[in-house]
């Protein structure tokens, strides 16, 4: 495959320049090699509009990235930068534009600095969460990282895609925790942001703003440059950790449960609140509960409440994480408990885990929910494995992630909108939306009502149904102000189109910036749902 609108002669010249920059062994053009960059969870697998690449180039340094970008700029070749990990459910390594050249920065894997007194790290794109965690452990540094599921992803790449984690407040907003970028611009120039723009400044990873406009957001979910270095704020390790669980008896108890938890979280007393519904998995083992969940009048909560009273299964549970000195977090837990007891009749509690740090190896292995204490792992993949409740697992999933206000009433409203919307389409994906769908709290101050739609490498009809469902869910959400924060390339144009205030001024503003900064449109064209001028009409 050639890049779009590039002649064979120009392509051969560009490949020669790429090989000169990084070495022959780090330029990949064979079908066997380029197939590794397909989206493993593509909903258009083996179809005409699957996003495929023409080649991949793996630099070792920012200087090599500059050389690659200069060559791409000279010939007008689109490039798509990636770091490491898979970005499963959100597009993998596949570009928005087929024929792009992937700049694969997995070899740029230096942990440049970790400071456990000022609590930051500076990393290259190829540093995974496992790498950073291992570096901290090997060097006996007194600092924590916040990790996503799974832990193989890039610290830098996850932040730039607005990825998230699981510990305390702003640390789990990974782009919000970043501090300073080094970026190769579309003409090959190297720029540093924030305090990095001042030569010799020792505060690159301390103070993100520097002086003048704050431009870092242009390099997240967008195609304005290739980020080659990033600072990120880390968490000082607490002395102890408590995980406690709260169970409520009625569906409507979610309203005060969320209200109290918002107060505790925004005051800094708890980490990420973890909402779940025990009825979600129970419905797959009990046809009575499954029928209740699919009934038209389930939304009033009466049948759910009767089932809860008869069977002793809570409609909602909440996990609470506390970090700090043991006397302080014990007091915080008792305070939180008193608030729930006062507001919610029949509430009950469970002690899940109590830890004092540091942990020895056996204690670390025994931790129940490792991401809550910053330990990267791959356990999340067990959720999609073959099981009694999932006897025929799909080959992958599309992730739909709308942002919903942090109230119980809004959760109920969004549940109903998305569930009934799918029912109107005649779609019944049991693991998707319903009255037992719980909100995710990865991002501080907002809920993600995320769900997954199945994809297959052999069942094109399933893929079409999932694509159609995804597109309709995006539209349903936008009609009610529930916008997605992250989506695969196939849907980025549609999602950006839902941010339509004032005749899509946000998209038009991004297009104006793209034309000024990247007039040839070579850096990740289409990324974020906006395109270079020459491609706009064709892609819309």
Image (cartoon, rainbow, N blue to C red):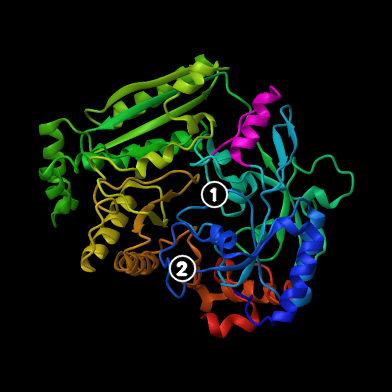
What stretch of residues is rendered in magenta? 128-147
At 23% across and 40% down in the image, what residue appears? 388
Residue 145: say if magenta.
yes
Q: Position of residue 207 (x, y in %)?
A: 75, 43
Q: Is residue 275 above or below residue 158?
A: above
Residue 161: say if magenta.
no
Front-most of residues 206 and 267 = 206
Q: Position of residue 277 (x, y in %)?
A: 28, 39
The Cα–Cα distance between marks 1 and 2, rounded to whole angstroms, is 18 Å
At 71% across and 76% down in the image, what residue appears? 11
Q: Is residue 496 above or below residue 485?
A: below
Tell me, yes or no, if residue 403 can be seen here.
Answer: yes
Q: Which residue is mark 2?
A: 491
Q: Position of residue 180 (x, y in %)?
A: 73, 48
Q: Is residue 192 left or right of residue 350?
A: right
Q: Is residue 405 left or right of residue 8?
A: left
Q: Is residue 455 left or right of residue 177?
A: left
Check disc 2: other Cα within 10 Å, few if <14, some if 14-19, many if 20+. many
Q: For residue 521, which quarter of the picture? A: bottom right
Please tell me which of labels 1 and 2 falls first in the chain: 1
**Labelled disc at residue 360:** none
Q: For residue 3, which quarter of the picture? A: bottom right
């Amino acid at each position: 495959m050639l890049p779009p609108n590039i002649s064979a002669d120009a392509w051969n010249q560009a490949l020669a320049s790429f090989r000169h920059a990084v070495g022959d062994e780090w330029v990949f053009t064979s079908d066997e090699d380029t197939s590794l960059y397909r989206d493993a969870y593509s909903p258009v697998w083996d179809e005409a509009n699957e996003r495929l690449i023409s080649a991949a180039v793996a630099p070792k340094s920012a200087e090599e990235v500059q050389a690659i970008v200069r060559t791409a700029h000279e010939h007008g070749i689109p490039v798509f930068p990636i770091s490491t990990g898979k970005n499963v459910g959100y597009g993998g390594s596949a570009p928005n534009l087929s024929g792009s050249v992937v700049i694969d920065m997995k070899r740029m894997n230096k942990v440049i600095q970790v400071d456990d007194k000022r609590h930051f790290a500076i990393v290259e794109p190829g540093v995974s969460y496992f790498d950073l965690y291992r570096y901290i452990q090997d060097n006996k540094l007194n600092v924590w990282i916040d990790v996503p599921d799974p832990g193989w992803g890039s610290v830098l790449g996850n932040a730039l895609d607005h990825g998230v984690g699981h510990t305390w407040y702003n640390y789990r907003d990974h782009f919000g925790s970043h501090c300073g970028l080094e970026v190769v611009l579309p003409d090959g120039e190297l720029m540093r942001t924030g305090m990095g723009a001042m030569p010799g400044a020792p505060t690159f990873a301390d103070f993100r703003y520097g002086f003048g406009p704050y431009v870092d957001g242009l390099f997240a979910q967008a195609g304005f440059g290739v980020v080659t270095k990033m600072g990120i704020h880390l968490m000082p390790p607490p002395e102890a950790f408590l995980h406690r669980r709260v169970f409520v008896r009625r569906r409507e108890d979610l309203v005060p449960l969320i209200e109290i938890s918002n107060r505790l979280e925004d005051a800094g007393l708890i980490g990420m609140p973890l909402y779940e519904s025990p009825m979600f998995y129970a419905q797959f083992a009990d046809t009575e509960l499954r029928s209740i969940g699919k009934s038209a009048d389930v939304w009033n909560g009466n049948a759910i409440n009767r089932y809860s009273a008869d069977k002793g299964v809570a409609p909602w549970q909440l996990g609470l994480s506390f970090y700090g000195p043991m006397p302080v977090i014990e007091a915080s837990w008792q305070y939180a408990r008193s608030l729930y007891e006062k507001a919610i009749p029949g509430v009950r509690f469970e002690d899940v885990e109590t830890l004092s740090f540091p942990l020895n190896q056996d204690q670390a292995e025994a931790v129940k929910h490792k991401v809550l204490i910053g330990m990267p792992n791959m356990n999340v993949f067990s959720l999609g494995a073959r099981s009694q409740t999932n006897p025929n697992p799909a080959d992958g999933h599309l992730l739909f992630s709308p942002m919903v206000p942090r109230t119980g009433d809004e959760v109920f409203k969004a549940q109903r909108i998305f569930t009934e919307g799918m029912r109107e389409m005649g779609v019944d994906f049991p693991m998707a939306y319903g009255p037992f769908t719980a909100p995710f709290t990865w991002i501080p101050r907002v809920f993600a009502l995320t769900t997954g739609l199945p994809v297959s490498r052999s069942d094109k009809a399933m893929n079409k149904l999932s694509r159609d469902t995804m597109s309709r869910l995006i539209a349903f959400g936008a009609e009610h102000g529930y916008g997605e924060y992250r989506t695969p390339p196939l849907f980025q144009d549609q999602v950006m189109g839902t941010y339509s205030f004032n005749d899509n001024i946000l998209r038009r503003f991004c297009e104006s910036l793209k034309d000024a900064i990247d007039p040839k449109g070579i850096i990740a064209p289409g990324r974020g749902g906006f395109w270079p001028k020459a491609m706009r009409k064709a892609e819309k």
